């Protein structure tokens, strides 16, 4: 059975693409689980295919997959739908599966309005997708109905099974680096925060799970030997556990991995010892979600940080030779010229290396979406 895992393009141009221009690490975990189970699986990054519909059709005709899995978030969902329609025109018998955060929160919408989509995988998808592939291969409809964490149609009606239980031990996952080369990596799943604009709390279940330092650094080592020297640690909050971060940094140094890397973290977890070890281990940039210079707006976003913590984090990060970057969101409920000025004033104080501004989008799966 031939399986294509595709990362779709966005139909609208994005001002900042570094956060979405490469396939999410979850797609590589799905692929590695399939390969461990001896399936013919290929990952295609179609984010930059520029909606070249003729090329998309040509590739699908050449590869002739039996199943296509599409990694969907809200911004690329229309690209995913377009790919699904082309695939269905080429092969009416193909099975098309949507997964990722978009499928998790919009499964009913997708299955109601788009006949091209056969299944949605909800939440953590590696093993529900594997079970689905096995059932499709056997033609086992009864087996499909017993799989937790999926949604599909049965006799014209939409069925959602009960939630799958998240894995307790992330180290049981096969290491994707054995099969693929990539540079976005993660050592955790989940975030301790509960920001109202973010879908992570609901997607991961308000719990953080950890790969061991040995698992994570072992993955880096395999990728380093394949030629990768820069990595983007895409954990929601990399510095969450001080001792663990120090252990990871020491292991990178002990293995003589001459790499550089960037991470995302939270100003409440900034610590001088951790910053020192991160710099020694090759960290060149840390991105912090500041969101607003206004305490009132930060409360709307449930961003539990004080201005003094923000200023301290940026000062310490810079002092240890690491480039500090800030994320801001504007257009939040209650935003005014006064709150925008507070943000401008804070930017002048913390002097970040760079800033990424986002206009607030209220997505399904977030607390703001439920409220508004």
Image: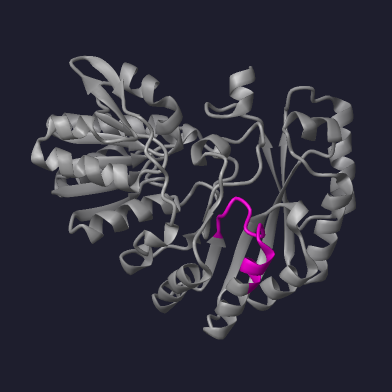
- Which of 368/166 is in front? 166
- Name the residue: 61% across, 79% down: 250
Residue at x 44% of width, y 50% of height: 24
> Which x, y percent locates residue 120?
32, 32
Q: Quadrant of residue 333?
A: top right
Q: 4 or 219, which is in the foreground?
A: 219
Q: Is residue 45 left or right of residue 333?
A: left
- Residue drawn at point x = 19 percent, y = 30 percent: 88
Q: Residue at x 86, y 27 (%)?
A: 337
Visible residue check, residue 66: no
Taking depth in this image into account, of 331 and 48 the one nearest to the observer is: 331
Looking at this view, is 232 or 215 the one in front?
215
Q: Quadrant of residue 118?
A: top left
Range of magenta residues:
233-246
Is residue 111 something one can see in this rendering?
yes
- Above or below: residue 324 compared with residue 84: below
Work out which residue is located at the far top of the displayed protein and give it: 156
- When the figure is inspected, residue 199 is found, relative to residue 131, above or below; the finding is above
């Amino acid at each position: 059975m031939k399986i294509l895992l595709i990362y779709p393009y966005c139909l609208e141009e994005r001002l900042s693409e570094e956060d979405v221009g490469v396939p999410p690490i979850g797609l590589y975990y799905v692929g590695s689980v399939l390969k461990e189970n001896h399936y013919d699986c290929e990952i295609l990054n179609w984010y930059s295919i520029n909606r070249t519909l003729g090329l998309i059709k040509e590739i699908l005709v050449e590869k002739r997959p039996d199943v296509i899995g599409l990694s969907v978030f809200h911004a690329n969902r229309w690209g995913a739908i377009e790919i699904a329609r082309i695939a269905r025109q080429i092969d009416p018998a193909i099975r098309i599966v949507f997964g990722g955060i978009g499928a998790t929160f919009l499964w009913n919408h997708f299955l109601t309005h788009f006949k091209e989509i056969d299944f949605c995988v909800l939440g953590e998808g590696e093993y529900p997708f594997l079970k689905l592939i096995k059932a499709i291969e056997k033609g086992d409809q009864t087996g499909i109905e017993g799989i937790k964490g999926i949604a599909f149609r049965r006799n014209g009606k939409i069925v959602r099974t009960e939630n799958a239980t998240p894995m307790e031990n992330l180290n049981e996952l096969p290491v994707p680096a054995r099969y693929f080369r990539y540079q976005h990596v993660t050592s955790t799943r989940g975030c301790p925060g509960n920001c109202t604009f973010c879908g992570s709390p609901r997607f991961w279940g308000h719990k953080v799970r950890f790969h061991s330092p040995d698992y994570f650094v072992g993955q880096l080592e395999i990728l380093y030997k394949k030629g990768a020297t820069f990595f983007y640690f895409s954990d929601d909050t990399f510095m969450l556990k001080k001792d663990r971060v120090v252990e990871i940094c020491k292991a990178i140094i002990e293995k003589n991995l001459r790499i550089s890397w960037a991470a995302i973290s939270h100003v409440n977890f900034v610590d001088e010892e951790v910053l020192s070890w991160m710099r020694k281990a090759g960290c060149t940039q840390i991105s912090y979600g500041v969101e607003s210079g206004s305490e009132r707006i930060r409360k709307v976003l449930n961003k539990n940080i004080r201005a003094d913590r923000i200023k301290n984090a940026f000062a310490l990060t810079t002092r240890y030779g690491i480039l500090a970057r800030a994320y801001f969101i504007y257009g939040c409920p209650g935003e005014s010229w006064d709150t925008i000025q507070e943000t401008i004033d804070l930017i002048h104080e913390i002097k970040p290396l760079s800033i990424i501004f986002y206009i607030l989008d209220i997505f399904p799966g977030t607390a703001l979406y439920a409220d508004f």
